[in-house]
Image: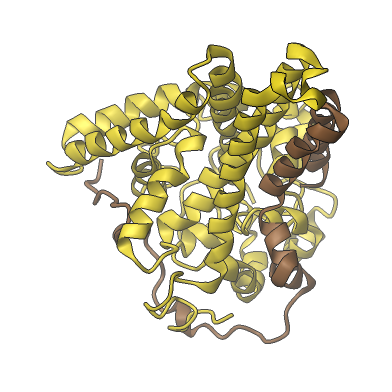
Chain colours: A yellow, B brown
Amino acid sequence: MNMGTPAGRGSGKGLFAHSEDVHCVLFQVFLVAGFALAFTMWNVWDSVPALAEYGHAGRNAFAVAAAMLLGWSSGINVGVNFHNHSHRKVFNAAWMNRWFGRFWTVSGGWPAYYWEHSHVTVHHAHLLESVDWTLPKRKANGEWESIYVYALAHWPFRYVAHLWDDAVSGRYGAKFGRKMAVEFAWFVAIWMIPPFVLGFDPLAVALLWLLPQWLANVAVMAPGMYAQHAGCSVKTADEPFGHSNTFVNRFFNLTMFNIGYHIEHHDHPSVHWSELPRFHETMKARYIDAGARVLPIGYYRGGQLLCRGEWVSSQRDLFFVQHADYIRPSDVVEAPSAPARSAVDVPVRAS
Amino acid sequence: MTRARAGNIGSTANRGVDSPGFGTLDVPSAQSDMNKAASPSGLAAVVGRSLFPLTALVLLAGTFVWGPWVTLGATYVWWRLVGRIG
């Protein structure tokens, strides 16, 4: 692996811009295969004895399981996998980036161009500012809204409203609205393929196509987004790393394209996802000195704790327990047992 | 709101602002256990990176063998397990 070298960043030859990007494509291929398998099994259920013996109740149970598994993977595929592509394209050929991208995000309920705009142009460019409408709303007292409200209200409702506003406002240029319209047309054309394959069976479409998209956004991407910036504040000179939380759980980063290294990602979005662990090592001492929040968990555990924290405050406190290797020496002397340095919904981090 | 350049699928535009000079950072040759775990190679990398869609494929195809109710139960157990360890 070559970090920061011309070879590591892609030489312009070959299929992939970076050798590790093959995994991004494989993920998408396996996911599409999963959808194809689920659709096929639904369509042939009554004609295969091993399946037909379970009746339609069994078929519906299978469809619910498929929705959970495929929705989960679709959430990762958009929020992590396509996310990486939106910062650093995986192919060397522009047309492949454009067309693979258009197919990449559909099972997650997003036109690729819309997600890229929301993430890069809005979220990254205005992280935690009032105009960053990708994040949870703040209450009058400055606290973040409930993670449940955020998850249920943001996709598709708030996203549609904000994207429409951006499209018609002209603030992104005269051609932006037209580009949005063209990409929406491609999205609809691709999105209609599964209903066609399922024979427009309403139950099949609801369970095997709509439910996965809802789960991808509400149960996977929204809690992840919430956890990434819970308790954080706008970047300042005094708190240069207070804008995000970094998660160093091994299993999580192995299976989630290193998305846990989120402070690093926001400060250096062009660093390739595969290089983030090494980059993290170079920054570790600075993070400790600055009191950056580095957590030993991943988003899944973090999301659970934040959800339970809506009802039991001690669960929310557990989310903020700093990784033992990243506790600032001065914090150990002053408060050796204090796990959290700020509350989830307090906009300003207290040291 | 600050006017920002709109993204363009397939272009190199608007990938976010990065600090210049990262390519010259000196990365220590000794890697931590965390780094080793996060940078697998070969088959381990394929399975690790695509663990979730591969698990989906195995559980869905396994329905032919063990039936849909076991698939649904295993999916729930997998969901809860990852919530604890991930």
Task: Residue at 61% x, 20% y: name it.
Answer: A207
Residue A117 occupies quadrant: top left
Between residues B61 and B40, which one lies in front from this camera angle?
Answer: B61
Compared across the picture, whether A346 is left or right of B66 comes to left
Location of the N terminus of chain A by quadrant is bottom right
**Residue B68 location, x and y as percent?**
80, 25
Compared across the picture, whether A145 is left or right of B19 comes to right
**Residue A314 location, x and y as percent?**
80, 32
Between residues A3 and A346, which one lies in front from this camera angle?
Answer: A3
Compared across the picture, whether A134 is left or right of A303 comes to left
Between residues A239 and B35, which one lies in front from this camera angle?
Answer: B35
Decide if residue B57 is in sight here.
yes
Task: Residue at 59% x, 25% y: name it.
Answer: A208
Decide if residue A238 is in sight here.
no
Task: Residue at 65% x, 85% y: name it.
Answer: B28
Q: Is residue B18 above or below residue A133?
A: below
> Total number of numbered labels?
0
- Residue farthest to the left, as pictured: A174
**Residue A327 location, x and y as percent?**
75, 61
Residue A340 occupies quadrant: top right
Between residues A129 and A206, which one lies in front from this camera angle?
Answer: A206
**Residue A283 location, x and y as percent?**
60, 72
Task: Residue at 29% x, 39% y: name it.
Answer: A183
Q: Is residue A120 above or below residue A69?
A: below
